[in-house]
Image (cartoon, rainbow, N blue to C red):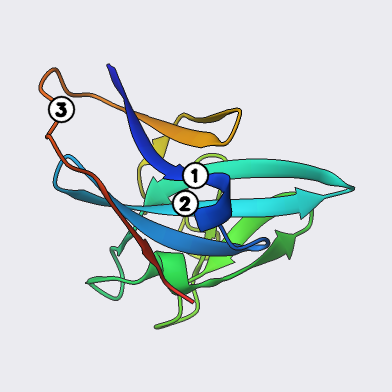
Amino acid sequence: MTWFNVATTSDLVDNSGVCVLVNGQQIALFSLTITGQNQLFAIDNFDPIGQANVLARGITGSIGDRLVVASPLYKQHFDLHNGQCIEMPEISVGVYPVQRQEQTIWIQLKSSQPRAETKMEAMV
């Protein structure tokens, strides 16, 4: 498992998502403020139902006590903690450990050879 420096806190949009390219893989990175506390979540950007890289552009919210992002294509909701689709529980997306160290955001992937470059692209 390798940690990748993917963004800074100034790259994030509160209560929204951005797409980061890490080791050739698109990951949706969400920064949510919940009861005054900022929390970070990282899931695959690829929507397996809509077959497109769009989840970073989805609308965040909650269903019951589950924090979710709604796909902008067909509106399925994906749980930000475990990646499971609420409407179709047999479908899920990958979820990745994410942490903040001072102003730097890190995501952990299974990879022993990090690429020389990571890109951060705001999807607002």
What residue is shown at x 41% (from left), y 66% (from top)? 55
Classify residue 47 as left or right of residue 66. Answer: left
For disc 1, the neighbor class at 10 Å (few under 14, some 14 to 19, many from 20) is some
Upstream in sequence: badge 2 or badge 3: 2
The percent position of residue 29, horizontal first and vertical second, equals: 47, 51
Compare residues 55 and 6 and report the one nearer the observer. Answer: 6
What amino acid is labelled 1 in the image? Thr
What amino acid is labelled 3 in the image? Pro
Upstream in sequence: badge 1 or badge 2: 1
The percent position of residue 21, horizontal first and vertical second, equals: 25, 51
What residue is shown at x 39% (from left), y 83% (from top)? 73
Marks 3,1: beta carbons within 8 A: no
Q: Is residue 92 visible?
A: no
Relative vertical location of residue 103 with respect to residue 55 in this rendering, above or below? above
Classify residue 106 as left or right of residue 21. Answer: right
Tell me the element at label 3.
loop
For disc 3, the neighbor class at 10 Å (few under 14, some 14 to 19, many from 20) is some
Residue with the mark numbered 3: 114
Q: Quadrant of residue 115?
A: top left
What residue is shown at x 43% (from left), y 65% (from top)? 56
User: Residue 8, which numbered label?
Assistant: 1
Residue with the mark numbered 2: 29
